Image (cartoon, grey):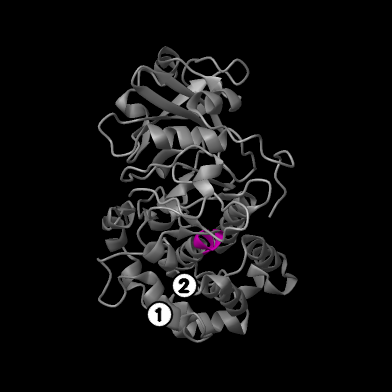
Amino acid sequence: MGCCFSARIKAESPPRNGSSSKDGGKESGLSGRSSGKASAPPTAPPTPRTQGEILKSSNMKSFTLSELKTATRNFRPDSVVGEGGFGAVFKGWIDEHSLTPVKPGTGAVIAVKRLNQDGLQGHSEWLTEINYLGQLHHPNLVKLIGYCLEDEHRLLVYEFLTKGSLDNHLFRRASYFQPLSWTIRMKVALDAAKGLAYLHSDEAKVIYRDFKTANILLDSSYNAKLSDFGLAKDGPAGDKSHVSTRVMGTYGYAAPEYMATGHLTKKSDVYSFGVVLLEIMSGKRALDNNRPSGEHNLIEWAKPYLNSKRRIFQVMDARIEGQYTVRQAMKVANLAIQCLSVEPRFRPKMDEVVIALEELQGSSDDSVGEAGSSRDHQNVKRSGHSSRSNGPRQHRSNKQSETIINEK
């Protein structure tokens, strides 16, 4: 699960209940750092209102601190696989049936996220994570196995996803991170879209609020799962059009109307998906001040190129040149444009995004194998765009895009 957990300024996401969805109930604060069918029951379980009800209704294992110390070899530094605002994430091992700790290298691998007592995130996000992942189950949501609540200690136990975060694969330039192929990128985009579509469905009715590459985790087969539900919110209740909340999330991914008004809707998530889709296409971060002047903001820089067959390749990641056709690139670019519409009403629903990505993958005339010999591929070669802002400088800018917003 690794480096999927990014630091955030304190988020006060209350437990799921009716009052959290009311239109007028302003929260206090914003933090700043830069459709397959679900296996869930037809309707979500009754909404818990207290900590006791949430923990009881989650049907997850309550681990003792001693058990998790044993599973992670006493939280040894060499067991750390990631770190963020919530705290460090440790690799551990448990028996897959009894869920008791076992020797390293045996049983099932787990990721244990431990709350940093001095961190900026806290108990409310820990509880929110249990509240949602204890009720919602889908192939494209990370599985929460259990939790630990002992004195001042707060921990969460997840399935371990061996490939880590999409963020690492797109933006790290270390030799052990091989560039993801076009085919895998489109698979990851589709999987993530399915997870988001499920959250927006009538079964779940959840707004994710922090969709970004760092929260998309990959298993050994590059199946993508959404993680980190600490900022998730219930969708609007009744005839309400939005949820009024303090603005929280990650700079570069949050929708402009949400940033301006605090009005949260499903279309806020759709905008964030558009940002991630553009990052997948380009291999560039949404925000990076180390890029040349005029290219710091990926969306502002890329938009003029997305409608042009001749110029689209200036946006595309040079590391996957020749793996796609012009037609494929334009289809994905058009979908990104729709998701990034300034007016929320012009953005598609996530179900529609899923259909568009499924059609792209299923197009018989868009075979990647044909790209190398097609005239489209020749156009790629002739375009010969510079990849100057796609180099090591992006790695140094990692902290920028990890900034979280916290408006009071």
Q: Amino acid at mark 2?
A: Met
**Dot 2 crowding, Cα within 10 Å, few <14, some 14–19, many 20+:** many
Tell me which residue sits at (46%, 72%) in the image. Answer: 316
Name the residue nearer the viewer: 306 or 137: 137
Discs 1, 2 touching: Cβ within 8 Å: yes
Name the residue nearer the viewer: 242 or 347: 242
Height in image: 13 above or below 359?
above
x, y percentage for residue 267? 54, 63
x, y percentage for residue 135? 61, 35
The answer to whether residue 46 is left or right of residue 69 is right
- The residues colored magenta run 266-270
| Of callouts 1 and 2, the N-terminal one | 2
Height in image: 171 above or below 72?
below
**Residue under numbered circle 2:** 316
**Residue under numbered circle 1:** 385
x, y percentage for residue 125? 42, 37
Q: CA distance from mark 1 to mark 2?
A: 9 Å
Q: Amino acid at mark 1?
A: His
Name the residue nearer the viewer: 45 or 335: 45
Q: Secondary structure at mark 2?
A: loop
- Where residue 73 sits, quadrant-wise, is top left
